[in-house]
Amino acid sequence: MSTTEQSTPNEVQQELAALRQQLNEAQTHLAAYEKRVQQLETELAEKQSQTDVVTSQQQKIIGATQALLDIQSIEELWSVLCTAARQVMNSDRVAAYLVDAGSSNLQIPYASGLSETYLQFIRNHYRETPAYQAGLPETIVIDNVATDPRTGPLQAMMQQENIQAYAGLSLVTPDNTVVGMIVTYRDEVRPFTPEEVTAGETLCHIGAIALRNIKLLRETKENLRRERRLSEITYTLSSVLDLPTILSSVVRLATRLLNTDAGLLGLVVDEQFITYYPYNIPSHVNLRPSTNKENIAWKIVEKRDSLVLSDYAAYELAKEKWVRVGITALAGSPIIAGDNCLGALMVFNLRENYQQFSDRDVAILESVGRQAGIAIQNAHLYAETQQRANALAQTLKRQAELDELKNKFIHSVSHELRAPLGIIFGHVELLNQTLADDLQPEQRQSMEIILRRTRMLANLVDDLTALLAAQIQEFRRDKILAADLIYSMLADYQIQAAEANITLQADIAPQLPMIQGDMTHLRRVFDNLLSNAFKFTPAGGSVTIRMWAEESDVIIAVSDTGSGIPADKLKYIFERFYQVEEKGYHRPGTGLGLALVKEIVEAHRGHVSVTSKVGQGTTFEITLPGVSGDET
Ligand code: ADP
């Protein structure tokens, strides 16, 4: 302070007092500022620590999420999810609780820090727990077990277990199904913060998604496995043909395919009783065929529909023996083949491995039932076909034996007849020549009848011998000019044609290949064809022989304008001793002629065919292989 004038002491004191006051005020302000600064610093630190908590919670959730999404087994999921929940909820103990919809039992797939006594108590009293009472999927937070009335009947047990606070967080899948609950427990009374609860809920939400994904993955793998097994069944059933193997395979494969404990196939026999084929059913269970229709297999067969039981013992037709074996769940499907129900295929789950059968299981069982039906039917058909084939083989064998016997018989008869017939024929001819002029007309007629009939008998024996020769192919293999053969035949039949007033004509192509064979037997072929043609053609008609080549074959056709052969008889005319019957008229003949034609032609590696129209005429066509290189 500078002043030009000297200040008085009083003035100085006043100034000093003012300065002190100013100083005091400044100090008060400063203190207030310092306090504020301190306040701000504390607030800042608090905010910082809150942020740290949130950040660490978030980090825990992120870490757990990554772990949860990587997990492939449900067992591992429970352990990771429960541990992470305990951490974010800052709790001391944790457990996962699941209520099985089918059995209404409480399952505890994971628990940490809880005594077995406590867990057993919860298993028995879960319906009284606050979480169950509150109705899922609500989150339930109990900060002080001792004072919260919601703890109810569990309170004493919780205190015995030294549980002071706990929080139950629901596991709800994205399709809003509540699958269970994670409960975290504290050993001290300390309220759960909203941040903790939010973090716990978020974690459980992610856990439920991971659970669903694992289940989907499991299902997909299971479906794949089932599809493989199903195609294995298809393959097995289509490659096996004996019934016992099919039946035991079906029941074994179906039991394995559906992952069940035991299986039973009931097959209806004669529509009267059912025989059983078991798999994994204890041997002391009596499985004799039953005629009693009051059982499950018959019900399935009668209704032709599947049957599913979740509690076998409660079923009206339940049998004591099966209840004693421990059967709890059952699924059965009919074994269907076309319109028939052949039996029933059943699978069982026993008490220890309680599991209900789903719609999918039943659909699979039905599909196996249908496949089994087809396989059983095929096996029946196969057995029948086998039987028929065996019977046929027997008949054929018998036929061959009879043929052999017949041939032997014909052979010995013709052999025995040939010599005496030749002698008789020779003597009759001699008698006829020497006595002809001395005989009375009736005697001459008798002589002619004897001669004609003896010649017929000799021809028959010749035919039979030729037939046997054709069968065993006892033929010469000379090169023959087919045209020469036909011309000589024409010459032989000219007189007969003129007598019968039938035109006999020929149309023979030039330059035909030679054929190979036995002239005597080939003559016999055309003898038979021509004599038939004349026999069945009335006066005024015509008989024509045509001959031409087709590729390396020589074709010879003998046509007539005779009576023709009815279409339904054509297939028989080449059989031995067959003659087309004509009402009230019997033509001479033995029925051997065409059989001989066929046998001889086929023995020459050729074939014969016929076309005919009743009232218009008949054509026989002979095809014989030409001998290559030799042209005439
Ligand atoms: P058959 O000794 O009776 O002539 P085939 O075996 O030669 O014996 O002939 C069998 C049957 O075929 C004859 O009974 C006859 O009914 C019929 N048949 C054969 N050739 C002719 C033909 N050219 N015209 C009409 N029917 C014929």
Image (cartoon, rainbow, N blue to C red):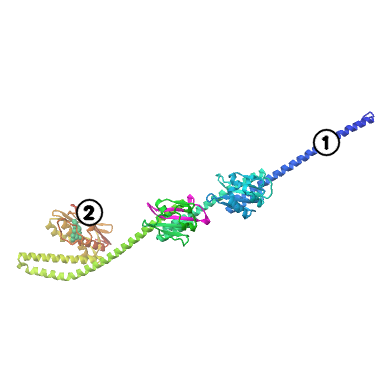
Q: Measuring from the top left, give residue 246's x and y in whole percent.
A: 42, 59
User: Residue at position x 61%, y 46% from top?
Assistant: 130
Magenta portion: prevailing SS class: strand
Q: What residue does disc 2 label?
A: 567
Q: Is residue 32 above or below residue 387?
A: above
**Ligand 1 visible in quadrant:** bottom left
Q: Quadrant of residue 147?
A: top right
Residue in front for this viewpoint, 611 or 284: 284
Of callouts 2 and 1, which one flags the residue occurring earlier in the amino acid sequence? 1
Q: Measuring from the top left, give residue 172's x and y in whole percent.
A: 58, 46
Q: Is residue 510 visible?
A: no
Q: What residue does disc 1 label?
A: 28
Q: Is 380 included in the stretch rendered in magenta?
A: no
Decide if residue 36 is on the left or right side of residue 343.
Answer: right
Q: Measuring from the top left, give residue 603's x and y in whole percent.
A: 26, 63
Q: Measuring from the top left, give residue 471's x and y in whole percent.
A: 25, 65
Residue in front for this viewpoint, 154 or 535: 154
User: For the residue marked with disc 1, what is the amino acid?
Assistant: Thr
